[in-house]
Image (spheres, helix red, strand yellow):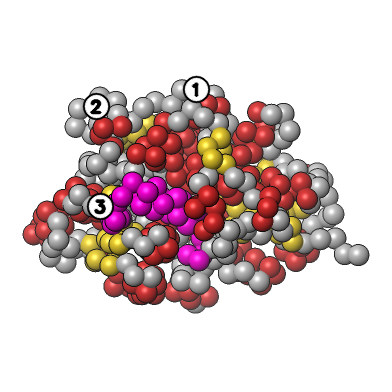
Amino acid sequence: MPDRTRFTLDEKKMPTSWYNINPDLPAPLPPPLHPATDEPAGPEDLAPLFAMELIKQEVSMDRFIEIPEEVLTVYRTYRPSPLNRARQLEKSLGLPEGIKIFYKYEGVSPAGSHKPNTAIPQAFYNKAQGIGRIATETGAGQWGSAMAIACALYGMECTVYMVGISYDQKPYRRILMETYGAEVVSSPSTRTKAGRHVLDMDPESLGSLGIAISEAVEDTAMREDTHYCLGSVLNHVCLHQTIVGQEAIAQMEMAQAEPDVVIACIGGGSNFAGIAFPYYHRKLEGKSSARLVAVEPKACPTLTAGEYRYDLGDEAGMAPKVMMYTLGHDFVPAGIHAGGLRYHGDSPLVSLLVHEGEVEPIAVHQITCFDAAVAFARTEGILPAPESSHAIRTAIDEALAAQEAGEDRTILFNLSGHGHFDLAAYEAYNAGELVDYDFAAGSTMSEGGA
Ligand SMILES: *Cc1c(COP(=O)(O)O)cnc(C)c1O
């Protein structure tokens, strides 16, 4: 009997609660501040934008929060997601038996990434509160497609402000969103004051994630029936993603393996939180001693080169100020292909854990990530999203370092999504046209975000 490769969790064993890290943090989380007054922002400041249940989750001190049955039903259409051992990759690297690489695969969701894990509950709680329409923004289109699907499933309208240059250059994600019934607006648009202001200054503006957020928030403020949703960074988004790590713990138990290191890429922090926070809890229970590693691009090195301080969440200053690692809210990273990792800040929860030494951040260049992605595709058969390739690069480097040191090591990483909509990036890589950008040499391209 060959050793097993795939660890399929029975549907009945899918977790029915999310894990909330708030009560287990090593230090109190500094509160968000109102951007105009610098006073702590309360529920009444957030209520015009978010569903009340989501605001409660944002500050909840309950360690486990039950997942509503209506959300579980939709989760079950694609969850539990698979956990595989990367045997063919291990073999191609010539690793000894004591070094094992496992990955949790979130590309099986209808959007092709982990993002529906939070889009679905966000749509559900808004619908339950009588909200009929969601406004949101998207960069390359991953978050917008997740939200478009979730709104379709709960019978809600969805308007997505898509960064203009992506709208023009990346039509397939737009077509996907429209096919799910969402309205996609190229940003900056003439629909909002924020958009018109930008167009007055520069009629040729390519847009940016900061401008698209401002447009979505302004759209929300103009209409009674509309709320705003965000795809990463916030506590409730990290919370919803913990379904990933809880499943992974159960699946690693099936594999009779305990990871020495847990790895995920980091943009706003949600897929990292998803796999790492449940392991953080497991460490507190004394059942794990895993290192938790967050991997960011060298072109946008928020955790490794940013400052830990209060900063605005968006360019225009409409969102609350939060305590986080930041490169400055006006920082525009170079045009790397991992669009979902081009955010100037990071989740306040993940930032706190980095500051307290509980999470190890590292930064890697994009070409070496694509080398790893292609090696992975040719051995494991899955074409990874450029974002996820950062985790693969680091998993391979961990394995090679263990081999060099003559140590055993069990490595687990989160494969946050597939790269079927990122083929232009692979075309550039295949043609040898990719470039690495250093942080200091950051370009002025304004495209970006997930
Ligand atoms: C959006 C995205 C990311 C980065 O966002 P996080 O909030 O840091 O998870 C990573 N991988 C994929 C596939 C994405 O779509």
Question: Gap between marks 2 and 3, in whole Å?
Answer: 26 Å
Q: Tell me where residue 203 appears, x and y as whole percent.
A: 12, 65
Question: Gap between marks 2 and 1, in whole Å?
Answer: 21 Å
Mark identifier at residue 79 = none
The mark nearer the N terminus, 2 or 1, is 1
Residue 434 among magenta residues: no
Q: Which residue is mark 3?
A: 226
Q: Judge from the rendering whether residue 115 lies leftward or rightward of residue 244; answer left or right.
A: left
Q: Which residue is mark 1?
A: 27
* Magenta-drawn segment: 110-136
Above or below, comparing residue 34 to residue 161 in the picture: above
Quadrant showing the C terminus: bottom left
How crowded pointer 1 is (Cα within 10 Å; few <14, some 14-19, many 20+) is rated as few
- What residue is shown at x 46% (from left), y 70% (from top)? 422
The amino acid on which the numbered mark 2 sits, given as a three-letter code, is Asp
Residue 125 among magenta residues: yes
Rendered image quadrant of residue 19: top right
Q: Tell me where residue 217 appears, x and y as whole percent.
A: 23, 49
- Secondary structure of the residue carrying tag 3 is strand
The mark nearer the N terminus, 2 or 3, is 2
- What residue is shown at x 72% (from left), y 51% (from top)? 251
Residue toward you, 66 or 410: 66
Mark whose residue sits in front, 2 or 3:
3
- Secondary structure of the residue carrying tag 2 is loop
Question: Gap between marks 3 and 1, in whole Å?
Answer: 35 Å
Q: Judge from the rendering whether residue 350 lies leftward or rightward of residue 252; answer left or right.
A: left
Mark identifier at residue 38 = 2
